[in-house]
Image (cartoon, rainbow, N blue to C red):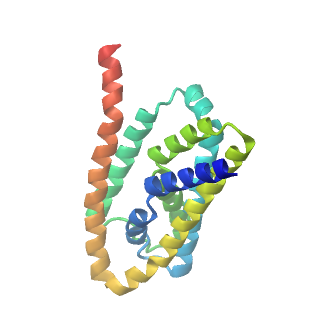
């Protein structure tokens, strides 16, 4: 029992650090600034459900999927970096989430934003996916294999609560404050994108040069 608790605590803290709900919240708020509270809550729920499905899927079948498709974690980081950069560029130019369309278009845009980039790779990013694969490899008993998705669920629950509660910040900042926050987060996202891109590119280049 103590071993299960220790493993669960280790998994929980690891995912909490990698997903970083407080770090995701400002990006979520700026991307959904034009949505109502109900629409924002639905978007947050879709994002965390997407992340849970992806992390659980990779935890149980990640190594097989990576081998089957010939995907490396490094390649995943490069792709994530490109997505982050494009998203950050749009945010820097205040072009994210200008949802001034009819209700059907808003629903489609909400779903698109919730799945990508919020669900993947903002919440379920390369680090969290890799962590899920590694921890499942370390889970040698049925109990450990059950504890892992429970830990993922608890972290994503905390993420959902952080995203929903953070909407109060947008009301306090107002339109001007939200635009400033949008541009600031866009710049930060572009910096993160560069880090992601080169973190994935280094092992790829190393493999090309030394093989």
What's the residue at 49%, 78% (across, down)? 165
Q: Position of residue 181 (x, y in %)?
A: 29, 72
In which quadrant of the rendered view does residue 23 lie?
Answer: bottom left
Left or right: 43, with 26 as reference point:
right
Question: Is 22 left or right of 156, judged from the image as shown?
Answer: left
Point 50% across, 64% down: residue: 109
Q: Residue furthest top?
A: 211
158 or 124, nearer to the observer: 158
User: What quarter of the picture does the C terminus occupy?
Assistant: top left
- Image: 78 above or below 97: above
Q: Report x, y in % for residue 190.
A: 28, 53
Q: Does residue 135 show up? A: yes
- Residue at figure coordinates x 72%, y 46% from the top left: 143
Most distant residue in the right direction: 142
Residue 93 showing in the rendered view: no
* Most foreground residue, 66 or 151: 151
Residue 90 in the image: state x and y as whole percent.
31, 59
Give coordinates of residue 176: x percent, y percent.
27, 81
């Amino acid at each position: 029992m103590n071993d299960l608790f220790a493993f669960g605590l280790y998994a929980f803290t690891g995912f909490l650090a990698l997903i970083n709900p407080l770090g995701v919240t400002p990006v979520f708020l700026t991307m959904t600034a034009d949505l109502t509270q109900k629409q924002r809550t639905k978007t947050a729920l879709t994002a965390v459900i997407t992340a849970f499905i992806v992390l659980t899927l990779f935890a149980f079948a990640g190594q097989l999927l990576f081998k089957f498709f010939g995907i490396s974690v490094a390649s995943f980081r490069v792709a994530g970096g490109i997505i982050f950069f494009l998203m950050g560029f749009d945010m820097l130019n205040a072009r994210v989430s200008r949802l001034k369309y009819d209700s059907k278009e808003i629903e489609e845009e909400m779903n698109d934003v919730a799945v990508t980039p919020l669900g993947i790779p903002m919440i379920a990013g390369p680090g969290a996916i890799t962590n899920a694969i590694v921890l499942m490899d370390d889970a040698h008993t049925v109990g450990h294999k059950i504890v892992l998705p429970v830990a993922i669920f608890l972290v994503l629950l905390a993420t959902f609560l952080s995203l929903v509660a953070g909407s109060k910040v947008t009301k306090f900042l107002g339109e001007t404050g939200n635009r400033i926050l949008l541009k600031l987060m866009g710049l930060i996202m572009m910096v993160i994108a560069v880090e992601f891109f080169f973190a994935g590119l280094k092992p790829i280049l190393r493999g090309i040069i030394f093989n």
